[in-house]
Amino acid sequence: MTKRNPHSLGHWLSWWLAVQTFMGLGLVCIVVYVATSLNFSARQDEELRHKQEVIRHLVAEIVTQDDLASLRHKLDDFFFGHTDLRLRLIEGANTLIYTTHPATGMSGHQCRIAFDIPSPWSRTTMLRAEMALDTGSDAELMRRLAWTLLASALAGAGIVSAGGAWLVRRALAPVHDLAQQAAALAPESIGQSLDGSAQADELQPLIAQFNALLARLENAYQQLEGFNADVAHELRTPLATLIGETELALSRERSTRELREVLGSNLEDLNRLASLVNDMLFLSKADRGERARRTPVGSLAELAAEVVEFHDAALQEAGVTVRVSGDSGGAFDAALLRRAVSNLLANATRFAGRGSIIDLDIEPDDSGTVTLSVGNAGPAIPEQHLSRLFDRFYRVDPAREHGETNHGLGLSIVAAIARMHGGRTFALSAAGRTTVGFSLSAEDCRSARSGGNAGA
């Protein structure tokens, strides 16, 4: 069941504040009405009981039937001015002894009581007393009280609703101000943060999160601009080479051997372009949330040794050796791990000092996380560059050394592979040694098999 969102927060708050106020005041009014009604009923019962005691006393004063005239006179004196009271005294079955003068304007709201009085002149006869109290005035008062309480509840709810609407508008004014500030943001001023100095404390976390979002957007926007420039630069050089060599080859007649040399040179640039495009497609898939296809890997050290063997020629040319330490197993995407380790090893080979040793460390821990890192001795990387080593096309050397073989996506691919395994990357550089690596979670082989079967 989905909740219906209010179209206007101000109207919604004002409406429900009025409803709750009316319900609260209505409950108070009901309590007041019931308490007043019970008080009137208790007063009426008390008055009838008092009159009952007086009538019993007056009847007890007479002795014989000859005293009935005196009793009637006393009762007339007692009920004189009490137009809201009526009494009938009946002896036996239907002998009327006394009745008050017919009251004019008696309403239909009456409180009645009937009781028996022993006859003073006969031990076998009872006198039946029937007394009625006109409660019309009390009923009219209660009716007026009910309407007054209802009007008060409605008026109170209306006043509270109006005051609540004003307070809501005033409370939401900072939100409108923030909306205007956000609306004034333009692509060229996306780094400008919202001014929250005049906002309430409750809005400060929202403003802080929004400003942090703007900062991330500015960073992403700058990275996008840099990415576009880097892509243009990476594509322009081989394309310019291809165009130049092709135009030169077509400028005059060429022998078959010369054309083959031109085509061979062009093929190298085309392969480089294809490699660049494939790497960008891979990063695009990783950004869309593609996960690694895990399969059981018994030894990461053996996998690393295979990568080292593949780089043997480059390592000999650079005059460095590789030392593999540690081992672990688990469920990984072996092909992706080979690619990540290969990129790290190639990066370390380019910057390692001749005659040094490159350390390839594999460190598992008790939480099921495996850390793979490659460390090399060489020039230290400044701190401001470490956080951007895994950005696309980012190079510490602005001169783009090794640009003919490296297009700046190697470490970005390492970061993507780490994310696909649920891990993260890190880079450290101090005291003439740089270590770059990543950590990832190692699923056990049984979960990998079940996941693979489910995927199939």
Image (tube, rainbow, N blue to C red):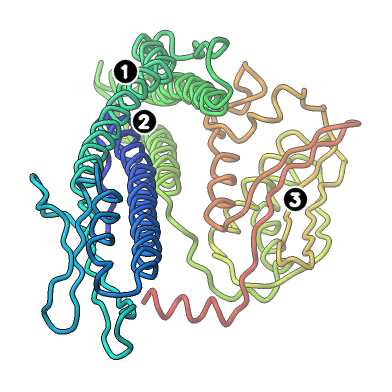
Image point 77% across, 60% down: which residue? Answer: 362
Residue 105: x and y in percent read 8, 45
Closer to us: 248 or 155: 155
User: In the figure, 425 relative to 268: above or below?
Assistant: below
The Cα atoms of the two marked residues, 1 and 2, are separated by 9 Å
212 relative to 358 in the view: left or right: left
* Callout 2 crowding tier (Cα within 10 Å): few <14, some 14–19, many ≥20: some
Circle 1 crowding by C-alpha within 10 Å: few under 14, some 14–19, many from 20: few
Q: Position of residue 211 (x, y in %)?
A: 52, 21
Q: Which residue is mark 2?
A: 262
**Kind of residue at badge 2:** Val
Up the image or down, 375 lies above or below 218; here it is below
Amino acid on which disc 1 is placed: Leu
For marks 1 and 3, the one nearer the N-term is: 1
Secondary structure under badge 2? helix
The three-letter code of the residue at mark 3 reads Ser
In this view of the protein, which residue sits in the foreground, 288 or 350? 288
Q: Which mark is residue 248?
A: 1
The furthest residue to the bottom? 124
Q: Give 126 or 180, whichever is nearer the viewer.
A: 126
Secondary structure beneath label 1? helix
- Name the image quarter holding residue 304: bottom right
- For the view shown, which residue lies furthest in the front direction? 66
Q: How many marks?
A: 3
Q: Are marks 1 and 2 in contact (CB under 8 Å)?
A: yes
Residue 413 coordinates in the image, percent (x, y): 54, 44
Which label is found at residue 373? 3
- Mark 3 neighbour class, 10 Å CA radius: few under 14, some 14 to 19, many 20 or more: many
Dividing the picture into quadrants, the one containing residue 168 is top left
Which of disc 2 and disc 1 is earlier in sequence? 1
Nearer the camera: disc 2 or disc 3 = 3
